[in-house]
Amino acid sequence: MKRNRTSEKGQAIVFLVVGLVVFLGFVGLAIDGGRAYSDRRYAQNAADTAALAAAGTIALELENRFVTYNTFNCNGADIIAAEGVGVAAAISRADANGFTITGPTSNWNGVEIDCGDRDYGYTEKLITVTVRIEDTTETAFAHLFFPSALEIRTEAVTWVRPPQPLAFGNAIVALNPDGCSGQSNGAGFHGNPDVYVDGGGIWSNGCLRGNGNLDVVVAPPSGIHYVGELIGGDLFSPVPQSAPYTLPPESYDITVPDCSHPSAHNITGNQLENMTTLAPGLWCVDGGKKTILHGILTGHDVTIVFLTGDLTINAGAEMYLDAPEQNPDPYPAVPGILLYFPPSNPAKVTLNGHAESFFDGTILGVTADISMLGTGNTHGTRSQIIAWNVEMGGGAETYINFEDNKVYERPSSLELAR
């Protein structure tokens, strides 16, 4: 009997065609995906550059309009004007990259600017620039599966901070985060002095201690904050407030004075002890073990760096020292920095001085211990004191008047957040 057989010829061609279609589909999707990724990266770069252009323009405007940390007011005319210039810069930069965005808006294809404070116990003041760009990617194959072109959305956020003094404008700062187990840890006030602080606050990363017959007063709106432990809180006015975070290191970081510069004055501690006048500029002191000042010393527009050794200013000494102001500055002196103790020098610093001694500028030693133990009726500074530990005692009435133009001020800055 003869059987009918169905021929299987041509089946391989069917599989080949189906496989080829699938393969071409994957190739098409890969091409479309690569195009979408490339377009998204381009749109993201455009958003980033537009946000940075706005932030850079705003930062420059804050400098030119002399907006400082203490004068920063989101509703002020200078801030509003700076924001307007920033919006225009963002729109212009986006247009140069082929994207059209609008002014202040919360939707896509726009630039939005917000101004406000962040309260961490210390107050961070900043302007936030947000640029959003929306675009589409035309596809060769994906449109067979998706009803419309692929949509791309990107966002860039930039923060602008105004010019600000170190440590967010606190006048007395102790960086040691330890508790009150040691007698000199943190910020300690003792004896019979009255301490008055105007224009800035008091901050301790750890212990804040008061004992004895004293009065520590900070003029409003500044306050008193501690992160660790409080002793003798009733001796302070206003009432000290517990803060959740220590000061970030970048808030008290500075441009290190350049003692290798040809214009810097490099001397020993013994030489400084015998001087009565310092010319404007940078003075770098190799103090050995200790430098003791006991006479009259006058220095205008000076930054004094103690590379090594401790410093003691005796009770009979008269100091009339001021740092260079922000503009102009006698390079390589550092504007606003009066006394600087590098981290490599954990100095013991005692600023007793005469009743008429004055220190104008920032006194900074992030690993140093600084004590003010004067005995006169008044002991004045237009300054801020930032150290590992800060101690104030004796019988003097100590006045610290914090003034922006007398202390170190960090320039306005910007940061691409995302």
Image (cartoon, helix red, strand yellow):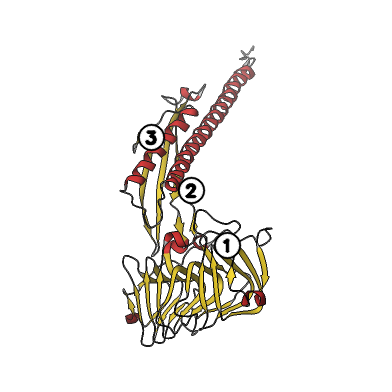
Amino acid type assigned to the residue bearing label 2 in the image? Leu
Is 249 drawn above or below residue 163 in the view shown?
Answer: below
Q: Is residue 70 visible?
A: yes
Q: Position of residue 384 (x, y in %)?
A: 46, 68
Dot 1: element: loop
Residue in the foreground of this view, choosing between 31 and 303: 303
Q: Secondary structure at mark 3?
A: loop
Q: Is residue 80 above or below residue 393?
A: above
Q: Residue at 57% across / 62% down in the picture?
A: 280
Tag 1: residue type?
Pro
Mark 3: few/some/many CA within 10 Å (<14, 14-19, 20+): some
Of the numbered discs in the image, which one, if any, rests on residue 280? Answer: 1
Corner quadrant of residue 155? top left
Residue type highlighted by circle 3: Trp
Q: Work out whether residue 15 or residue 240 is closer to the camera in this orientation and state it.
A: 240
The mark closer to the camera, 3 or 2, is 2
Local SS, label 2: strand
Q: Earlier in the sequence, mark 1 or mark 2?
A: 1
Is the residue 46 above or below the residue 416 in the image? above
Sequence-wise, the earlier of marks 3 and 2 is 3
- The disc at residue 414 is 2
220 horizontally vs 349: left or right: left
- Horizontal side, residue 253 vs residue 273: left or right: left
Residues under labels 1 and 3: Cα distance? 54 Å
Q: Tell me: 171 left or right of 286.
A: left
Give how far apart the Cα atoms at labels 1 and 2 are.
32 Å
Q: Position of residue 402 (x, y in %)?
A: 41, 66
Mark 3 highlights which residue? 108
Task: Residue at 38%, 42% (x, y): give it.
Answer: 83
Q: Earlier in the sequence, mark 1 or mark 3?
A: 3
